Image (cartoon, helix red, strand yellow):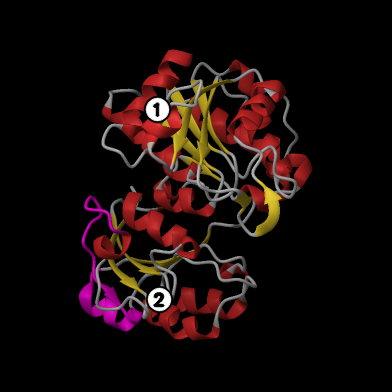
Amino acid sequence: MNLRDAFDTPVSAIVLAEGEFGTTGGKTANGVVMHSEIFETAAVVDSAQAGSTTDAVLARPDVPSVPIVDSTEAALSEAPEAEALVIGVAPAGGDLPESWIDDIRTAMRAGCDVVSGLHVFLSDREEWAELAEECGVRLFDVRKPPEEDALRVGDGRVDDVDADIVVTMGTDCAVGKRTTTFELYRAAREAGLDAGWVATGQTGIMVGAHRGVVIDRVPADFTAGVVEDLVVAVAEDHDIVFVEGQAALTHRAYSGVTLSVLHGAWPDAVVLVDDPDRDERTHFDGWPIAGVDSEIEAIEHLSEATVAALSTWGDADDVGADSDVPVANVYDADGPETLLEAVRTAI
């Protein structure tokens, strides 16, 4: 999916993040507010944070100061020009919460397209499709996988692209792979490089990746082929392609999709992302983190890529003292540039 082609950017948007803005559960909403090159957030809906602003909740001075309100109706009062409602939370259980229905309907009746990261697809439900037609708006379900006739197994055609390919991989889930991918892409653009990027999760698609798919919705046999197609498409128009990884090769639950991204992209270089304060896998208590060294060994054993750098949540100097590769925190002033320099040296 490429939302860039669907909108005349930037698009004034309301972000629905009920109960989760600023938390890990609201990472899609957080990412859209901080980084989207498609949607310019005009208001955030989260009754738990209503009355505050986005920069205060995210504690980031570089984040736009956008009001947080308790309903879509209030958001439309703040931003009557809004053209899209972005659903930035995917609740546990996967279905659409009953309490969100009026908010979404209000936005549609005000002329807002709906961009949804929900596990259920609004466009497949008759009542929502009919309302969209009535209101003259569009429904985008970013988790929808490609159509069956577009699926294929990987065949190595990515080997023939002229662009350099860089994948961000991790020591666990939710360690900042998407953020690192975007920051590398942005640093490359600011350095004058012709860069593009590929998303493998819903946040990246909403942020504005040049191509993307929610890779965990693709049948296993075809995941590498789908990633390969996305990388080849972006490489046609760009000299360097950054690819968002998923999970970790050493993760017993999710390693299959991780390996598919690695093999489908077949990168020249990898940036590994790690949270040095995490000892156990998120949501899997009792499963220890294998660690940076084990992950690097697995990456370089299962591909021809060089691990060029380590992106850390911690203090880069402290972590770097024990690392054999360059280390940086993307939230530090020169963090993305340090990682990019290491990548360019590696390739």
Location of residue 108 with respect to 283 vertically, above or below:
below
Relative depth, front residue between 301 and 259? 301
- 37 sits to left or right of 24: left
Q: Is residue 9 visible?
A: yes
Residue sitting at x 67%, y 58%: 285
> Does dot 2 land on a helix, a strand or a loop?
helix
Please identify the quarter of the rendering in which residue 66 is found: bottom left
Q: Quadrant of residue 335?
A: top left
Q: Residue at x 44, y 26 (%)?
A: 321
Q: Which residues are magenta?
A: 59-81
Residue at the location (52% across, 54% down)?
202
The image shows residue 274 at horizontal and vertical percentages of 52, 40
Residue visible at 25% across and 54% down in the picture: 63
Residue topped by disc 2:
108
Q: Amino acid at mark 1?
A: Leu
Is residue 186 highlighted in magenta? no
Task: Tell me if 161 is positioned left or right of 309 in this view.
Answer: right
Horizontal and vertical percent for residue 188? Answer: 34, 27
User: What secondary structure is the stretch in magenta mostly built from?
Assistant: loop
Residue at which label 1 appears: 339
